[in-house]
Amino acid sequence: MRILLIGATGTIGKAIAAALSRRHEVLLASRQQAPLHVDIADPASIRSLYAQVGKVGAVISAAGQARFKPLDELSDADFRFSLDNKLLGQVNVIRYGLGSVADNGSITITSGVLAQQPMRGSGAVSLVNAGLEGFARAAALEAPRGLRINVVSPPWVTETLQALGMPLQGGLPAATVAQAYVGSVEGTATGQVISP
């Protein structure tokens, strides 16, 4: 199967690519250096990516940024950045991708544990993660041609906790998290929030 992976240069993206490339043709896209360039905060960039790759069997988005700051420090610009990037960026990955995914294919996006388990500083992140989960459930009800839409809600990733110098308790290795995406692509679930 041809799988378009957006966010391929990130910690989770690299692990997803490694897990899927053994059995599938994985097309790597990223805002950073990757064979295919995309900025999901820019609708034209998403449309251009889909035009470039043509039909695929599945799309995975492991991309999207949101601001992590105390509530009284989050500015209008911080909220707008988070909404335009992680939330609307991935909403548009689904919306614009419906015509590019083959019949009975799938689109999988990424939220995160802060939708269910907020913490101090996660106001904007929790907002966009919860919004993504609600949208994916609703979009799955209307997806045409047997397309499946799911969202993976990863916990903190061990490699990220290490890089931030935070305690590793509660973290999962990226390779373990990647298996949730594999299950979404290769399985039959739709309209699900998948927690690794």
Image (cartoon, rainbow, N blue to C red):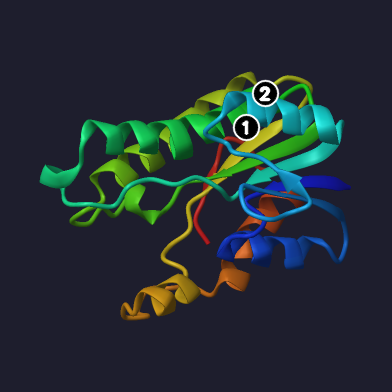
When the figure is inspected, residue 16 is found, relative to residue 90, above or below; the finding is below
Does residue 188 appear in this view? Answer: no
Residue 159 picture location, percent across and down: 49, 75
Q: Secondary structure at mark 1?
A: helix
Nearest to the observer: residue 144 or residue 8: 8
| Image spot of residue 185 (x, y percent) | 73, 48
Nearer the observer, 13 or 44: 44
In whole angstroms, how far apart are the C-alphas of marks 1 and 2?
A: 6 Å
Asked if the residue under mark 2 is in contact with the one under mark 1, i.e. CB atoms within 8 Å, the reply is: yes
Visible residue check, residue 124: yes
Q: Which residue is mark 2?
A: 96
Q: Residue at x 21, y 53 (%)?
A: 121
Between 23 and 121, the one lying in front of the other is 121
Name the amino acid, label 1: Val
Residue in view at x 32 percent, y 77 percent: 166
Q: Amino acid at mark 2?
A: Tyr
Relative to residue 73, is residue 144 depicted above or below?
Answer: above
Query: Which residue is drawn at the image coordinates 37% and 36% (left, top)?
Result: 81
* Label 2 residue SS: helix
Q: Is residue 90 above or below residue 19?
A: above
Residue 29 coordinates in the image, percent (x, y): 71, 48
Say left or right for 93 vs 110: right
Residue linked to disc 1: 93
Q: Quadrant of residue 169?
A: bottom left
